[in-house]
Image: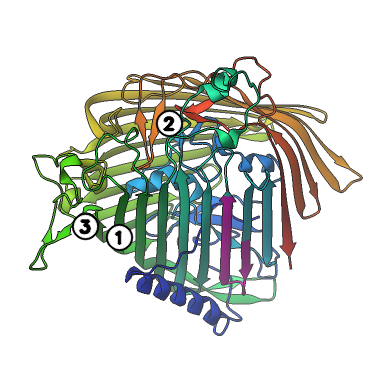
Amino acid sequence: MIRKEPLSIYIYSNPVAVLSRTCLLIMTSIILSFGAFAQGDRDWNPHAMPGEGEPLETVKDPSAWTLTYPLGFHIPAEVDTAQYNYQRRSIPSMASDAWATTGNLGSPGMNLLWFEREKPSGFLFYNALGFWMPSFAKQKFHNTYIPTTILQYNYCGTSENHQDRLQGDFAGNVNRRIGIGGFVDYLHSKGCYNYQAAKNFNFGLSAYYYGDRYELQTFYQQYAHQNLENGGITDDRYITDPAVVQGGVTSVQYKSIPTRLTSAKNLLNGAEFYMNHAYKIGYWSEEEVNDTLTRDIYVPVMKVLYSFDYRHYRHTFSEKSRAQDFWENFYYDQSSTYDNTKLNSFSNTIGIYLIEGFRKWMKFGLSAYATYQLNQFTLPNAGYMAETEDGDSSEGQNTSSNDSDLTPLPASGIPDAKHNQNFVFIGGRIEKAQGSILRYNADVRFGLSGDAAGDLELNGQILTNIPLFGDTVAIEAHGGFHNTTPDWITKHYVSNHFIWSNDFGKIRSVKFGGSLEIPWTRTKATIDVENLQNHIYFGSNFLPQQYGGNVQIMSVGLNQDFKVGILNWNNRISWQVSSDNNVIPLPQLSVYSNLFIKARLFKVLHVQVGVDCDYYTKYKGYTYQPATMTFCNQDQTELGGYPFCNAYVNLRLYRCRFYVMMSHVNQGLFGSRYNEFSLPNYPINPRRFQIGLAVDFAN
């Protein structure tokens, strides 16, 4: 019923831990203190909570929402209790219908469907693991009158290559005004190939309070992800033609395949604490309950808002061996590498919101805000700086005992080891969130100071429902214009293997699109178009580059489901084209197809039995660089053109979901195995038997 996104815990040994633990203590105190003062309150504010206008004694169905940034307005979200395709979540290469991955569950990956990619984080290294990470956009709040706990466990493999994931989610309401939640996500997967293990631990707490005059929404997330990096296998023929490299032996022991790296490791730790306060200004009004009873309700006219957001990121890349054949440059140390990068980000926002619907003539809501943001960066060269005799740091000097073997530092110099950024933004939002026929919203944000001076972000969306043939056709249109500054690490970075300092210009983007959904034909069609100027990508030399020209991307999608009795055939087709595949390479066609039988046995057992498949066409895609956790363009190897199929049985009995699955069931069935690679030198997982269980404990 509740979120599947990971959130995590990690105890730091640096001063930032003080703030992290303080935020956690604040969250715990808020949750424990709520019940002491809020008994007997009326229902929550209509703008803030679903179920507006229902009697107080009504038992509502569970609902969920995420938040807009930075003012914390609500976006309806799904309550996760679905049986359909529950098994798909445990397959690394099926994170989307076209996904590039290093292979293991919890490992770096990138969505190959352009318009489904997440917005890049301000911390470069977060992007590769973003699918497994918590984030502001993924944080869900729940309104459930029955406290609910969901426990999930997924498993496959043997002691050498096992894959375990244990998740726990909780949501409950103290009363009509107060809700609390929390979750834990532990993932440990050794991987099918050597030196690619992943171990992730995430957790989070959330709470909200809605009173007549005061509102609070807050959450705390923390995560710790550890990924071994093997750089890929040394020879693709271990997969494509094993007899050639194994002296005639055709069977493959996947754990015995040699890899290009054997001691490299990425650690990514972080935390986020967000709180949103709102004080409502309005008037009391008398509301008729029935023919004989009335009650006083508070009608808010305006909110005064304050939001605080703290984010901490820490990335460490380490390697103990001397992989001369893998790295081109060794700037500071040839025997080992320890690159440590940090970012602390603090944002404070004040705003006002004129509430939609406080009078019949007030058909929309209107808000304005101002944000001050401070970013504090620490680059790896802070750790490589040598100490001089007088105790001063000699920044940028080679510190190896044998400097003659080191790569000379760039003549143009290197970026400072520590850097602060100060931003001031102003913005606003207009929205119509009520009504069944037409809803819309538009946001604008301007950058006023620092590197963000001149930044502009403008987004808008229109949604309408048209009654037709006894059902409702849903139409959505959206668009946006962005003129934004690249993040600082993409412009400036120093490490043992890579150094860059770039004067990149602002990235400009114009995009628009829409969707049409027809329920009775089980059809949904989408179209999206974007024009990019000054796009930044990582080239074949693993360094960031900016393309000064324009690149156009167009995508057309079709979701079409068919049903005849108990037989179902669900399909998703995406066609996309890039005007310059040297800058933004994309597979043109991707298909997800799921053929299954869905039935209910003995009136209580829900069964889904079927075969599903992912496929995307060949393209000269990306390669992966472990030291920077980036996906870089390459033009040597064609990828794709291979179907990845799974056979599964998915069951639901009351509040229990269970599946058994044979993933990659088609391995070796189509002859050649030359396309069984998601990235160059990174094969997809072989055939595996997997099981999973989810139990919903509703108290």
Disc 3 crowd rating (10 Å Cα; few below 14, some 14-19, many 20+) is: many
Which is more toward the observer, 319 or 616? 319
Whether residue 30 sits left or right of residue 596 in the image: it is left
Q: Which mark is residue 345?
A: 1
For the magenta stretch, what is the residue range? 169-188
The residue wearing badge 2 is 114
Q: Which mark is residue 382?
A: 3
Q: Residue at x 26, y 42 (%)?
A: 490
Disc 1 crowd rating (10 Å Cα; few below 14, some 14-19, many 20+) is: some
Relative vertical location of residue 222 with respect to residue 536 in this rendering, above or below: below
Number of numbered discs: 3
Residue 663 picture quarter: top right
Whether residue 275 sits left or right of residue 464 in the image: it is left
The furthest residue to the bottom: 36
- Under circle 2, the secondary element is helix
Q: CA distance from mark 3 to mark 1?
A: 19 Å
Could you say where residue 160 lies in the image, as x and y percent from the top left?
Answer: 63, 45
- Inspect the image, locate mark 3, and give the three-letter code of the amino acid beneath it: Ala
- Under circle 3, the secondary element is helix
Q: CA distance from mark 2 to mark 3?
A: 36 Å
Q: Is residue 357 visible?
A: no
Relative vertical location of residue 86 with respect to residue 97 in this rendering, above or below: below
Relative vertical location of residue 118 with respect to residue 202 in this rendering, above or below: above
Q: Earlier in the sequence, mark 1 or mark 2?
A: 2
Q: Residue at x 73, y 37 (%)?
A: 661
Q: Is residue 547 magenta?
A: no
Q: Earlier in the sequence, mark 2 or mark 3?
A: 2
Which is more toward the observer, 64 or 318? 318
